Image: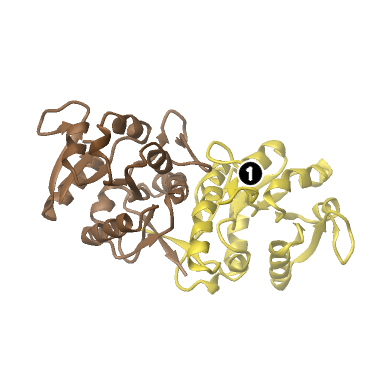
Chain colours: A yellow, B brown
């Protein structure tokens, strides 16, 4: 499948590499084209499936630079977190009664947004086996077919447990998990960690 | 040890029973005395160790009804969450840049507040074996001795893994985990669930 990866940081690179390794065609989008990247608008036009890997505070702005017809009906997997590092400890710029995932879905109703993979480090996203044993990834979104497609992609990434927590408002829950993630990262000194829901 | 359990709902009752079963002397405190309960002020005066099990939105008000001299130097384990059920899905009345744990510590600097046990159901709090396998409880607080005392109590409760996530501002992280907890409870239909940090 043709994939448009919006963002060329470590997260975007890791996801683009993984998607390519699985046989997908990938265009990465950046603020300005060059170095093998297209613009955000070009990558979004190219992809049948879109992934937002931009910093959370710019995700909406990036999508505003894309022509509306190039978003229509597409699945967008939002892995970004609305982290604000101007505060220490880092805070979320939106939290509790709203979420970045919902903001994207609300402003771009033509997209089928699935919040996913935002609860772990980018290396773990594409190589879940870095963390030993059983652990989980969460998805939230309004469109059942989009969640099924995302789940299949996550299984192809190597994830063994995908927990569907409901509609896109579930992004409030998974984005808020950044607060504990950052504490645990600080404590253990390694990003190779993840959550297992035990029951 | 003499324990003052503030709150006579299901959480307070479960914790008071558990403490008593471990050989501690317990007085439960309620808004008005009777039925074997003291007032909040009487229970706080009685306890060398205090536990707040009131609804999160009233925890501060309850502590304001206690004479300052009866709080001085005491360890207070705060298990309450600032949940606001007037919204659906439920939200937190304080979140992200502050927490109930911090609010209590700030208003009552004479207390040594430890945020603990607020990430699981009351039955799991006192009987962690209800959830199979390995899973974690988190503590946060400014006073090392208070955290050690709390850890020992949690081990006596049956917890096998207590993760110290740092100072009381860590309560922002664990209180925020209510958002995912509520989604998971809704999905799985059982409160017998908990988190395992895998690494």
Q: Quadrant of residue B46?
A: top left
A33 lies left or right of A199 = right
- Dot 1: few (<14), some (14–19), or many (≥20) neighbours within 10 Å? many
Q: Is residue B49 visible?
A: yes
Quadrant position of the C terminus of chain A in the picture = bottom left
Residue B55 sits above or below residue B158 on the image = above
B61 lies left or right of A49 = left
Residue A106 sits above or below residue B122 on the image = above
x, y percentage for residue B95?
Answer: 49, 40
State the residue position of label 1: A100
Quadrant position of the N terminus of chain A in the picture = bottom right
Residue B10 sits above or below residue A8 on the image = above
x, y percentage for residue A93?
Answer: 62, 43
Q: Nearer the viewer, residue A22 or A116?
A: A116
Tell me the element at label 1: helix
Q: How many marks?
A: 1
Residue placed farthest to the top in the image? B32
x, y percentage for residue B68?
Answer: 28, 34
x, y percentage for residue B155?
Answer: 25, 62
A75 lies left or right of B39 = right
């Amino acid at each position: 499948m043709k994939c448009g990866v919006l963002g060329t940081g470590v997260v975007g690179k890791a996801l683009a590499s993984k998607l390519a390794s699985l046989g997908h065609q990938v265009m990465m989008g950046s603020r300005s084209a060059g170095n093998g990247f297209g613009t955000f608008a070009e990558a979004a036009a190219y992809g049948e499936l879109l992934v937002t890997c931009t910093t959370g505070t710019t995700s909406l702005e990036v999508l505003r630079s894309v022509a509306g017809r190039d978003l229509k009906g597409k699945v967008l997997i939002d892995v970004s977190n609305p982290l604000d590092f101007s505060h220490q400890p880092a805070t979320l710029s939106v939290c509790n009664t709203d979420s970045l995932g919902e903001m994207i879905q609300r402003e771009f109703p033509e997209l089928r947004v699935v919040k996913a993979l935002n609860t772990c480090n980018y290396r773990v996203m594409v190589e879940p086996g870095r963390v030993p044993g059983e652990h989980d990834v969460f998805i939230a979104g309004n469109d059942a077919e989009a969640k099924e497609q995302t789940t299949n992609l996550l299984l192809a990434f190597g994830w063994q447990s995908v927990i569907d927590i409901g509609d896109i408002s579930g992004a409030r829950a998974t984005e808020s998990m950044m607060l504990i993630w950052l504490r645990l990262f600080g404590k253990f000194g390694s990003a190779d960690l993840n959550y297992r829901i035990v029951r």
